[in-house]
Image: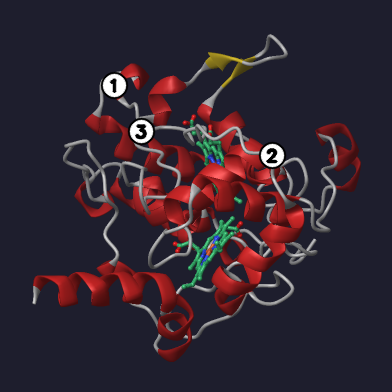
Amino acid sequence: MMLIIAGLHLGYSRERTDLVAMATPIDFAVYKPVSHYVVNLVDPQMAPEDIRPSVMRGFHILLETKKSLPQYADCAVSCVDCHFGGGNTLGETNGGISLVGAAKRYPVRGKDGKMMTLADRINGCFMRSMNGVALPTDSQPMQDMVAFVTWISSVVDKVEDAPWLGLKPLASRHVPNIQHGREIYINYCSMCHGKFGEGQKREFNLDYPPLWGKHSFNDGAGMCQLQRCASFVFYNMPRESPILSETDALDVAAFVTTRYRPHYASPESQENNRAPVGTPNR
Ligand code: HEC
Ligand code: HEC
């Protein structure tokens, strides 16, 4: 009896991925992230009264980025598509890229020697991951996102206490094979992200975000780096059961990161193109 159950379970997670994905809208709440760390996360709704409205507005921007700030985000991806739950997780399996404790890292000296604040780092994701433009750091929406990340970070004292931050590099030294990555993509990813990486709109659930093409993150994004993308996929994708080996994750990441996508434009060239606030769809 035990053997039969074990066999069924394996068959389910290996082969039925596509069937499950296509047949029913998935309730993502069922797929609780798996983490080895024990930390009590804080609910945005539990923020002290004086900052709660700002924290909640910030949370909402992370959930619906393009809808909230169309003039700054030129893509169909939202922060939560990479930072699951707005980053209010402890990373690892299916937790996406955590932001819990991230506020304690900033300000930090960047590679260019300049000090980088949390707002500057968020703008880094706006210009690359969102293929958009930087927000004025003193604007209300930026203050709100900073308030949200700072509130969920309040559960740790210093960034060293948050080892779950950042995508963990994979141990494999495998040289990626793009052709094999394409096969993995068709078998394990295309049912949600689309045959051409275009994603899918869904009515009552999170959209499936695009992975390449003109509505995706640009070529300057962290997700466009082979190692980061492979690590993200290894720990988080396919969404309902991340079952790829490191080798397969590297292959599919090599395929995804070499597809066509928007080109990153430097802040200087963006400065000249910046749309006035309130202009929809830059
Ligand atoms: C396409 C995926 C993607 C999207 C969308 C995205 N990010 Fe990120 N973000 C990343 C990656 C990759 C990193 C770097 C992770 C690492 O260090 O390994 C990162 C890092 C960050 C960090 C720094 C974390 C730290 O540990 O210091 C912040 C803050 C952040 N993102 C905020 C945001 C916000 C706010 C949005 C929405 C406006 C957003 N991101 C959208 C992929 C994304
Ligand atoms: C069951 C549907 C499903 C499958 C299958 C799936 N994904 Fe995803 N993927 C999602 C959803 C939904 C998100 C948005 C994040 C979330 O779930 O909160 C996402 C987010 C992503 C992201 C970050 C956001 C972005 O736009 O870049 C990447 C990269 C990604 N998936 C790659 C893959 C790869 C590669 C595969 C195949 C190995 C795969 N996914 C299979 C549903 C799926």
User: Please, what secondary structure does the residue beneath circle 3 have?
Assistant: loop
What amino acid is labelled 2 in the image?
Val
Q: Which residue is mark 1?
A: 161
Q: Position of residue 142 (x, y in %)?
A: 54, 42
What amino acid is labelled 3 in the image?
Trp
Q: Is mark 3 within 8 Å of ligand 1?
A: no
Q: Which residue is mark 3?
A: 164
User: Please, what secondary structure does the residue beneath circle 2 have?
Assistant: loop
Q: State whether residue 182 is above or below residue 131.
A: below
In this orientation, does residue 131 appear? no
Q: Is residue 250 left or right of residue 28?
A: right
| Residue at (73, 13) in percent of width and height | 112
Q: Is residue 244 left or right of residue 210?
A: left
Q: Which residue is mark 2?
A: 175
Few, some or many C-alpha atoms within 10 Å of disc 3 (few <14, some 14-19, many ≥20)? many
| Residue at (40, 82) in percent of width and height | 20
Q: Position of residue 33 (x, y in %)?
A: 29, 54
What amino acid is labelled 1 in the image?
Asp
Few, some or many C-alpha atoms within 10 Å of disc 1 (few <14, some 14-19, many ≥20)? few
Q: Earlier in the sequence, mark 2 or mark 1?
A: 1
Q: Residue furthest bottom?
A: 23
| Residue at (43, 90) in percent of width and height | 23
